[in-house]
Amino acid sequence: MDPSKSRDSAESTRVIQFPNDVLERILSLIDSHRDRNAVSLVSKAWYNAERWTRRHVFIGNCYAVSPQIVARRFPNIRSVMLKGKPRFSDFNLVPPNWGADVHGWLAVFADQYPQLEELRLKRMTVTDESLKFLARKFHNFRVLSLLSCDGFSTDGLEAIATDCRHLTELDIQENGIDDISGNWLSCFPENFTSLEVLNFASLSSDVNFDALERLVSQCKSLKILKVNKSITLEQLQRLLVRAPQLTELGTGSFLQELTAHQYEELERAFIGCKYLDALSGLWEATTLYLPVLYPACTNLTFLNLSYAALQSEELAKLVAHCPRLQRLWVLDTVEDVGLEAVASSCPLLEELRVFPADPYDQDINRGVTESGFLAVSLGCRKLHYVLYFCRQMTNAAVARIVQNCPGFTHFRLCIMKPGQPDYLTNEPMDEGFGAVVKTCTNLRRLGVSGLLTDLTFEYIGRYAKNLETLSVAFAGGSDLGMKSILVGCPKLRKLEIRDCPFGNEALLSGLEKYESMRSLWMSACKVTLHGCKTLATQRPRLNVEVMKDEEIDDGQSYKVYVYRTVAGPRTDAPSFVQTLCS
Amino acid sequence: MEAPPARGREAAAPKRDSAGEEAELELGLGLSVGGGGGGGERAGAKRGRILTARDFPSSVGTKRTADESVSQEGGGGSPTSASQVVGWPPIRAYRMNSLVNLAKAPRAEDNMSPNEKGKSKDGSEDNTRTGGMTDVDGREQKHIGFVKVNTDGIPIGRKVDLNAHACYETLAQALEDMFFRPAKTIDLTGAEENRQVKKSSKLLNGCSEFVLTYEDKEGDWMLIGDVPWGMFLTAVKRLRIMRTSEVNGIAPRFQQKSERQMRKPI
């Protein structure tokens, strides 16, 4: 044992010090980045062992650290996940060209991590040049996943398909992409066999079907295939018979006139899919063709119907064949009746997301209500993740829901009309959300809506001791609301607020908090430039970025984005972003 | 126009204005729908706009839901409807676009004549080209796209791309821009083509004298806003911005009512 490794002799008699290589061997088995972060704090020896053995790094805010700092600390990274813009950029609250361009990172990685294999990006700007650079510089590159990114086109995908010889995963989801043509798919080399995951569901251009069919036939390890709407049922059948080993399938368009023979073939193809545990796509699915899915549904754990406007009876019949379902995403066209069917057919359900088919429609007679949610909570006691868009809700219903399912970890309720009270009592929704935080002690993520006074936030601050992410819109009465959160929630990491009457006093009440959080977003609130400057002055290790809010005429409204960083103010801020310096 | 003669509530040809009518004109222009609900003190909140079904009393046959403005004690902003606020409801842009296209895809169970069924088949195939946030330039072949829009008193019609909109509010806004922009030469009487309308400067405030209507597949003229956006897209053939005086012939009472509507905070 090397005496220089032990901290001091007294401790070495108590604590067995492992030789470095043993320690590293053990630590290399730890994957969770949170565990690794904890490990690195134990001692200098453990810090070093950890940094040498870390293969995957997760960076939740690309501006919290610089690529140089990352490379200096972690010499052996093979896999990176980067998140960029604030979440509200998904809803057009952040102007274009705000930043989060991945290229600076790629340039450093090309130098420091030439063996990089995996890159997963969320809300980053990615240009075609970056994709071409990636394909050219990293010869061992295997996994590319882009979610909610922007700035690239299918030309960039061509480069990836052409040059990444060992690609195992190409996952393109919900990006602001310039979809020029489907030619990229034909760019995979003729003898290409390594693909395991292919998801191009969110692209719209037609791809060359022969190329796709060949790809699917050759890639025997293909487990996840999600095609886009241009793929017909007939084509789907041909793909399925070549890939019966699929575990996740995203269909193309589910509407096509089939002959009886073709229908039978399709049915047989689905019967052959014995390993499916996730199903999505299903654009334009109707009563006619849904039954072909039934045989493949026995082991389904995830069903994503959020692009298929099913009616309640159609959903009821479908979920009757999905006894093992754990996660379900639907459109509110299924209505409460559809959700009642889910409640009786899917007792193992853990996650439910209900999206509005017509978000701007104000007709309260459409979509889902509190009774659908209540029904699911009665039938599915394991429910712990809900995202629910509705037009009416009551405090009593919410209270009963959490009583039935106290295990909620993610409770995201969106009553679509801003500031809407309990529709039966006309009271604020304070007591409903109060019940949520009092009952659900494991709550990690909360999205509130409806008419809410400061009382809601008092409840949250007092009871939500495990809360990490909170989204607030059109709510609250005074600075006291936001203060309650900042003073009360010890594990808060992300706070995003829009259109609330919280001002400088509220902002500054978080002085002690922000460095332990990832970020704070405030827009259309009452903070002023002066308040933000005060914050910046008092906390030099935070970046306090302000943008003039163009939506509001008074010329004094700002969108504020505050985040902790060890990289200092960012050097790529566009002219409309002002970083306030201390 | 090749469309069958309009049935229903009003005459096909726009009436000529008399001097008396012009004096009553206070055209609502400009954009009352704007993003962001912060503060509720925005200067532009009371500008006029083209009326849609939501403004009309139930006597005009629209379905009124309980969505009057909610006065919030201490609420941050007080926007009344989801569609007037930027980024709300919080749904990713990609999904929003998909929903628009979803609404346009006719379903097999829908009551359709054999004619329309054939059309809808084309529609559903064309839907494969849609979705996502891409601008597919000239390759769009959706069966709903550009429709004709005519305004009473303006002899030359326009075309508007319904695909570019996801709700009635943005459509109304676009039409206001198109027809009532002050810089344009607007000939309201239809009599002389080159007469500059001095009213164009008045067009930025006051109540709306116009109503937005559409002709559906059955040839009936309907008030915009009754049905969900998606259903509207499958039914609409063309649009017409009509004088409120022509709707059901209930002109004077109507204008008073619409004035009251204008005073409500948006």
Image (cartoon, rainbow, N blue to C red):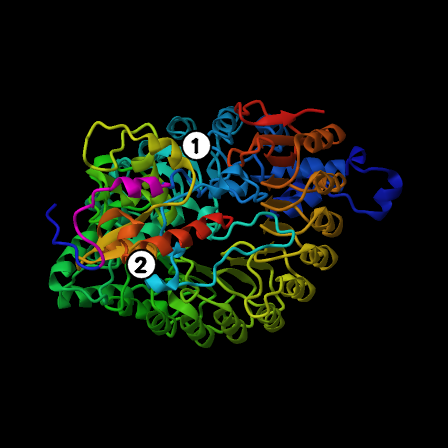
Q: Is B112 displayed left or right of B35 in the figure?
A: left
Task: Residue B142: tell me if it is visible.
Answer: yes
The quadrant in which the N terminus of chain A is found is top right
> For mark 1, what is the residue?
A126
Task: Residue A192: tell me if it is visible.
Answer: no
| Residue A79 badge | none
| Residue A282 badge | 2
Q: Which quadrant of the figure has residue A426?
A: bottom right
Spatial distance from mark 2 to mark 1, Cα to Cα? 29 Å
Q: Which quadrant of the figure has residue A233?
A: bottom left
Q: Is A413 displayed left or right of B226 in the figure?
A: right
Identify the subunit bearing mark 1: A
Give the main secondary structure, helix, strand or loop, of the magenta stretch.
Answer: loop
- Residue at (51% x, 23% y) in the render: A111
Name the element at disc 1.
loop
* Coordinates of residue A382 in the picture (x, y in percent): 55, 69
Q: Are marks 2 and 1 in contact (CB under 8 Å)?
A: no
- Residue at (60% x, 26% y) in the render: A578
Which range is magenta?
B9-26
The quadrant in which the C terminus of chain A is found is top right
- Answer few, some or many: residues within 10 Å of disc 2's Cα (few below 14, many 20 plus, some between 14 and 19): many
| Residue A115 position (above or below residue B171) | above
Name the element at disc 2.
loop
| Residue B256 position (above or below residue A122) | below
Q: Nearer the viewer, residue A542 or B141?
A: B141
* Coordinates of residue A259 in the picture (x, y in percent): 13, 65
